Image: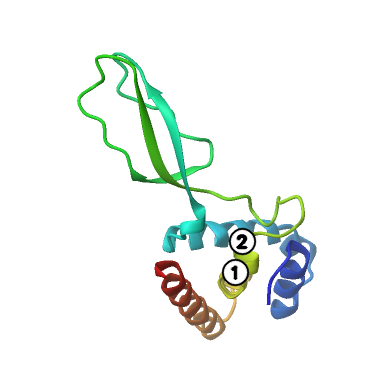
Amino acid sequence: MAWTFTTLKSAIQDYTNNTESTFVSYLDEFIVNTEDRIQKLVSLPVFRKNVTGTLTLGNQYLSVPTDFLSAHSFIVAPTPNANFTAELHYEYTPTSITTSSDGTSYLGTNASDCLLYGSLLEAYTFMKGEPDIMANYEKRFQQAIDRLKVFAEG
């Protein structure tokens, strides 16, 4: 099942049986934390970009893009003695399902189980939930991550 922001928030509330206002106010944070966790656990080719930039005389640094998460390749040594164009291959942080204009995201569509179980872990941690339930969600999250890694590795 693919999630939209609205359906994911409803599912979290349904699974946790919690509609208390403070809990509901943290739903976005649970989801964003999960998106971040997924991105740091799985390198998905769809979240890779290449950009060029200019290395300038005497400056050993190159500004990174605003959506930069991690580099795949880029090496410069020594400090340039002239201006050079360089290419950076990097993994970027995509727009969150919580802020996308249409309420959808790649992870919501293609890694829905990761997003759900990770968000439930965040929610149950917030609620100080039962350890056995949290262990079950952690296990399901890890299984979903393992499947996503196999998918990402092609």
Query: CA separation, marks 1 and 2?
Result: 6 Å
Kindly identify the amino acid type of the residue bearing the numbered disc 1: Asn
Q: Position of residue 102 (x, y in %)?
A: 77, 55
Q: Which residue shows up at 30% across the image and 23% down it?
A: 60
Split into 4 quadrants, where in the image is the N terminus? Answer: bottom right
Count of labels in the image = 2
Kindly identify the amino acid type of the residue bearing the numbered disc 2: Tyr
Q: Which residue shows up at 57% across the image and 70% down it?
A: 111
Label 2 sits on a secondary structure element that is: helix
Q: Are marks 1 and 2 in contact (CB under 8 Å)?
A: yes
Q: Is residue 81 above or below residue 116?
A: above
Is residue 95 left or right of 25 when viewed as pictured? left
Q: Which residue is mark 2?
A: 106
Q: Which residue shows up at 71% across the image and 50% down it?
A: 99
Q: For residue 39, which numbered disc appears in the image?
A: none
Q: Nearer the viewer, residue 80 or 18?
A: 80
Q: For residue 110, which numbered disc appears in the image?
A: 1
Q: Position of residue 44 (x, y in %)?
A: 47, 60
Q: Position of residue 138 (x, y in %)?
A: 49, 77
Identify the image quadrant of residue 34: bottom right
Q: Position of residue 57 (x, y in %)?
A: 31, 13
